[in-house]
Image: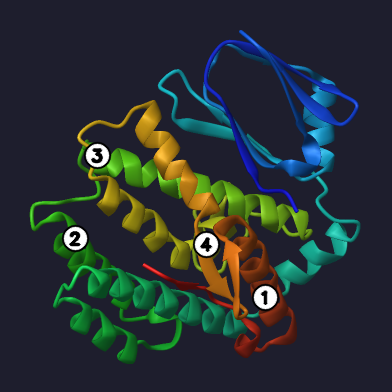
Amino acid sequence: MSWRIVVISSRAKLDLKMNYLVVRGETLTKVHLSEISILMIESTAVSLTASLLAEMSRRKIKVIFCDEKRNPSAELVPYYGSHDTSGKIREQICWTDSIKGAVWTEIISEKIRMQSAVLKSKKKSEAELLDRYINEMEFADTTNREGHAAKVYFNAIFGMGFTRTADTNINAALNYGYSIIMSAFSREISALGYITQLGLWHNNQFNQFNLASDLMEPFRPIVDARVIKLKPEKFEHEEKMQVLEIMNHEVIIEDRKQQVDNAIKIYTKSIFNALSENDVSLIRFYRNEL
């Protein structure tokens, strides 16, 4: 089982040798590819060989590239994640509005439930309002309980003056964490043979990751909880590494403790089972021990 998150934050050359990632920087470091779940290239002063990228793509290892500000800006996504990709894409195109709406309703209800859990862990009375929104949920969230819950939630944990559009360290940390979670979801979607462009609810023609944007929603509160704990007065390398550690955070899914990275695999597969079998009871959500 892959579990390492490898971050390259300074000048180095990366290549492949005998199934090992070889990092040639100030020192020589080797990591077996079977141990790696995510490789993050945080510095633009890093060079990689094509053979390494090809092997990482074959092994479905997520590779994330950062820009000059060390923020995630691109990722490596294989063309073919599964032997039956063409069949899976045809199936994806044929998902009905009925099952997509039903799955989306479950996803958003669970997102609000996890937001409520974060508020309860901080003894915030607004959790009661979020619980009420869950009970008021209509098919496909036509009354936008998600939007109302988000406003109440963020104001409760970060203050009444907080907005998600402001240029703050809190938003920088949230965006960084969300981008890591989205990358993990896009990896799993591709690995299972589906494409990330066709979503359940998100349908922005300029968004390459509509489906990942849909599926990741219940996992956002994991990022939120980490940022609340971090309370970043600055957001630089050390703070980014602390946010990145969310992928190794343990949650409960299918009555077992799993790291978030593995929970994403289980949950994503269950979503596709639900869509294929027209049965939302097949979805497996996680429980978080805050």
Label 1 element class: helix
Q: At x 33% / y 41%, what residue is drawn?
A: 173
Left or right: residue 196 versus residue 248 is: right
Give whichever of discs 4 and 3 has the lower sequence position.
3
Please give the label number shown on residue 270: 1
Left or right: residue 128 versus residue 208 is: left
Q: Label 2 near label 1: C-beta < 8 Å?
A: no
Left or right: residue 72 versus residue 134 is: right
Tell me which amino acid carries mark 3.
Answer: Pro
Q: Label 3 near label 4: C-beta < 8 Å?
A: no
- Which residue is disc 4 drawn over? 250
Query: Mark 1 packing: few (<14 Cα in 10 Å), some, or many (20+)?
Result: some
Give whichever of discs 1 and 4 has the lower sequence position.
4
Tell me which amino acid carries mark 2.
Answer: Ile
Q: Label 1 near label 3: C-beta < 8 Å?
A: no
Label 2 element class: helix
- Which residue is disc 3 drawn over? 232
Give whichever of discs 2 and 4 has the lower sequence position.
2
Label 4 element class: strand
User: Nearer the observer, disc 2 or disc 3?
Assistant: 3
Q: At x 24% / y 39%, what residue is drawn?
A: 232
User: Nearer the observer, disc 1 or disc 4?
Assistant: 4
User: Nearer the observer, disc 4 or disc 3?
Assistant: 4
Residue 3, compared with residue 172, is above or below; it is below
Q: Nearer the viewer, residue 282 or 25?
A: 25
Q: Nearer the viewer, residue 67 or 276?
A: 67
